[in-house]
Image (spheres, rainbow, N blue to C red):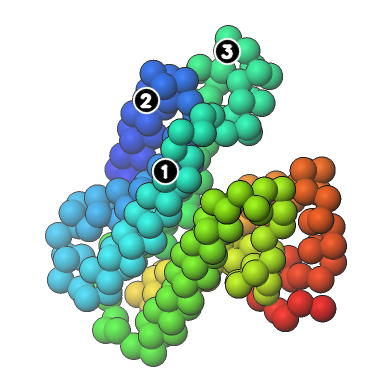
């Protein structure tokens, strides 16, 4: 089952890569991230007919779909008409004529592999032949997932409203949830995946803890907080003061 889902992910990311070649825009890899998890969840559910008899299986698939499609649609809307993201432009300039095929490995297949690894708790939970009935751990998981969706969705909405106001050009967003944490959307993602993991653990997949651990590492040290804040003080001088008074990740009243 895991090998089949990996092949599906490779096929899907390859198709997205081909579209990126036609558009000359590797940024479309970002909106596909959330959708990729939706594809994996529903493929696994369809691939394993016995999973369709378990309430937890449907709940996991629905929760994954709500999160994944919301994220994909938001990123698609946010990036529409802005051209290729500066990260991919820098990679394109660095690799030159080779970028068209280098991007397949370093952007699309790499993202697809990470997507597949992170989605393993969902896949394993759906594959459980004797799933346990819904219990207190599932309720805790749903509460954590709901909190994550609130922080991620509300954080994105508040930032979008802030950015469309011309008076805020070059300024730092420090209102709403952004007053409690510099990255409410990443904190929300963190909660989402620990929530999904707890639900998978309730189905007997506790050993897949490497998945939310990996996602947490990516959010904190690789593609999330660290990457975003690497150059932001150069573009927004006010950000240093914002950093000094605002929690970097977990919500906390400003100092």
User: In the image, residue 55 lies at what x, y percent?
Assistant: 22, 76
Q: Which residue occupies the foreground of this view, 40 or 20?
A: 20
The structure residue drawn at horizontal position 20% and vertical position 65%, both measured from the top left corner, is 51
Residue, disc 1: 76
Residue 154 location in percent, x, y? 49, 68
Q: Horizontal placement of 183 versus 205: left or right?
A: right
Camera-nearest label, 3 or 2: 2
Crowding at mark 3 (Cα within 10 Å: few <14, some 14-19, many 20+): few
Tag 3 near tag 2, CB within 8 Å: no
Judged from the image, the secondary structure of the residue bearing numbered disc 3 is helix
Q: Which residue is painted at 48% across and 76% down in the image? A: 147
Q: Which residue is mark 2?
A: 19
Mark nearer the N terminus (2 vs 1): 2
- In the image, residue 106 lies at what x, y percent? 56, 30
Q: Residue at x 51, y 17 (%)?
A: 100
Per the image, label 2 sits on a secondary structure element best described as: helix
How many callouts does the rendering have? 3
Quarter of the image where one finds residue 179: bottom right
Query: How many angstroms separate mark 3 from mark 1 (CA)?
Result: 26 Å
Q: Earlier in the sequence, mark 3 or mark 1?
A: 1
> Residue drawn 20% across and 73% down?
54
Q: Disc 3 vs disc 1: Cβ atoms closer than 8 Å?
A: no
Q: Is residue 47 left or right of residue 91?
A: left
Secondary structure at badge 1 equals: helix
């Amino acid at each position: 089952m895991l090998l089949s889902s990996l092949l599906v992910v490779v096929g899907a990311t390859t198709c997205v890569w081909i579209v990126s070649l036609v558009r000359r825009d590797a940024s479309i890899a970002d909106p596909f991230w959330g959708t990729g998890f939706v594809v994996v969840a529903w493929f696994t559910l369809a691939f394993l007919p016995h999973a369709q008899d378990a309430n937890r299986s449907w709940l996991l698939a629905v929760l994954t779909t709500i999160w994944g499609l919301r994220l994909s649609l938001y990123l698609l809307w946010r990036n529409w008409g802005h051209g290729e993201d500066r990260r991919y432009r820098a990679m394109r300039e660095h690799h030159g004529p080779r970028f068209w095929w280098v991007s397949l490995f370093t952007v699309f297949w790499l993202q697809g592999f990470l997507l597949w690894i992170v989605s393993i708790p969902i896949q394993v939970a759906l594959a459980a032949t004797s799933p346990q009935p819904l219990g207190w751990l599932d309720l805790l998981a749903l509460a954590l997932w709901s909190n994550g969706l609130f922080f991620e969705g509300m954080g994105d909405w508040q930032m979008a409203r802030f950015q469309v106001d011309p008076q805020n050009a070059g300024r730092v967003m420090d209102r709403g949830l952004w007053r409690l944490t510099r990255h409410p959307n990443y904190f929300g993602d963190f909660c989402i995946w620990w929530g999904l993991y707890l639900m998978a653990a309730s189905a007997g997949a506790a050993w897949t803890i490497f998945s939310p651990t990996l996602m947490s590492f990516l959010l904190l040290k690789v593609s999330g907080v660290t990457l975003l804040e690497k150059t932001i003080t150069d573009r927004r001088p006010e950000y240093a003061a914002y950093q000094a008074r605002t929690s970097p990740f977990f919500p906390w009243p400003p100092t």
